[in-house]
Amino acid sequence: MFKKKKGFILSLTVASSILLAAGCSSSTGGSDSGKNKGGDKLPAVGATIYKFDDNFMSYVRRAMEAASEGKINLMLNDSQNDQAKQIEQVDTLIAKGAKSLAINLVDPKAAQTIIDKAKAKDIPVIFFNKEPDSSVLQGYEKAYYVGTTSSESGVIQGEMIAKAWEANIEKYDKNGDGKIQYVLLKGEPGHPDAEARTTFAVNTIKEKGIEVEELAMDTAMWDATKATEKMDAWIAKFNEQIEFVIANNDGMALGAIASLEKAGYFSGDKFMPVVGVDAIPEALDMIEKSKMFGTVLNDATNQGKATIDLATNAANGKDVLEGTDWTLDDSRAVRVPYVEVTIDNIQVGKDAYK
Ligand code: BGC
Ligand code: CA
């Protein structure tokens, strides 16, 4: 009996890993049948996420699944960080009868290829999280973007760093030269968020009249484990010289904190201010434990919801904004605002991710 059960569980595991390997997960619970409570057929929406194994995107995905419930048959694919694979997935989704597409590009530069495929079949496309070039988006009147204004997160992060520095200069300015000696963990090069956050964070600090010295900057591809490796190397090289850790997202901030903890930081009087972006629950927890100074809310819930709201309307042949509170800017984008989050307003982050 026990043996049998084990075999059953094993075959289930094998079945699900085959599904995973195929990069395909048939969407949300309940809508698998593709029908709503009344038994009507739900419109099919094809979606891709650049990789399921991304901290922030897992929250966006959850919000998309919740928003799809009973409204659409969401065919959601894991593109496994492979642009060629994603293009094949889009072909399959179109072949399966997707009435609209919600695409989180692997490579922002691949937008044109996706648009060409969608346009040929007159299918609307909602890109989300990785913003295509505006000129590409403008080339197809049924193409939209849901995300943020990337630069805003950099400005908010820079302002937060400047405020923190000024309020704690005695403690933070370890060598007493008045300058911030920082290391910066960058997201994926070429990703509009990574580029804008890096530039705008540093420029905003300088605009506030604070001098900075960059000890090191490198990409850790948005990833905590990669960030720990980078930070280990930087601590070995610069040790006490580092006065601030600036991370393009919380995943990398968490990775840096793991490295700092190993090196004895956050105990006794060994301290390091660390900032990130996203406000994921794991980061809020670090802020409450005083291991992270602050973050910038990147509202995964509302971005996921807006993506599905627009995709659902599009799939039903309606105006994408019908019945919603979202607005489109001149470049046909819905932009969800960023918000500074520190211990003083931590509830803002908690509410957004609950
Ligand atoms: C988020 C990152 C995430 C990336 C994925 C960014 O907006 O801040 O955490 O890894 O999007 O594209
Ligand atoms: Ca200094």
Image: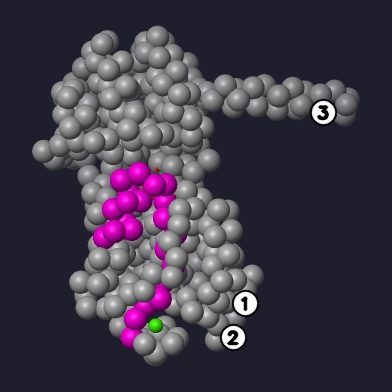
Q: Quadrant of the N terminus?
A: top right
Do residues under tags 1 and 2 come within 8 Å of each other at their CB atoms? yes
Residue 287 in magenta?
no
What amino acid is labelled 2 in the image? Gly
| Residue 268 numbered tag | 2
Q: Quadrant of residue 57?
A: top left
Question: Would residue 181 be counted in the magenta stretch?
Answer: yes
Q: Which mark is residue 38?
A: none
Q: Residues within 10 Å of mark 3 (few under 14, many from 20)?
A: few
SS state under label 3: helix
Q: Which residues are magenta?
A: 178-200
Relative to 297, is 88 on the left or the right?
right
The residue type indicated by label 1 comes to: Gly
Q: Mark 3 to mark 2: distance in Å?
A: 49 Å
For disc 2, the neighbor class at 10 Å (few under 14, some 14 to 19, many from 20) is few
Asked if the residue under mark 1 is in contact with the one under mark 3, i.e. CB atoms within 8 Å, the reply is no
Mark 1 → mark 2, Cα distance in angstroms:
9 Å
Q: Identify residue for label 3.
A: 6
Instruction: Give residue 76's quadrant in the image.
Output: top left
183 to the left or right of 305: right
At horizontal 32% and vertical 33% (from top left) the residue drawn is 109
Q: Nearer the viewer, mark 1 or mark 2?
A: 1
Secondary structure under badge 1? loop
> Residue beneath label 1, please?
264
Q: Position of residue 62 (x, y in %)?
A: 44, 39
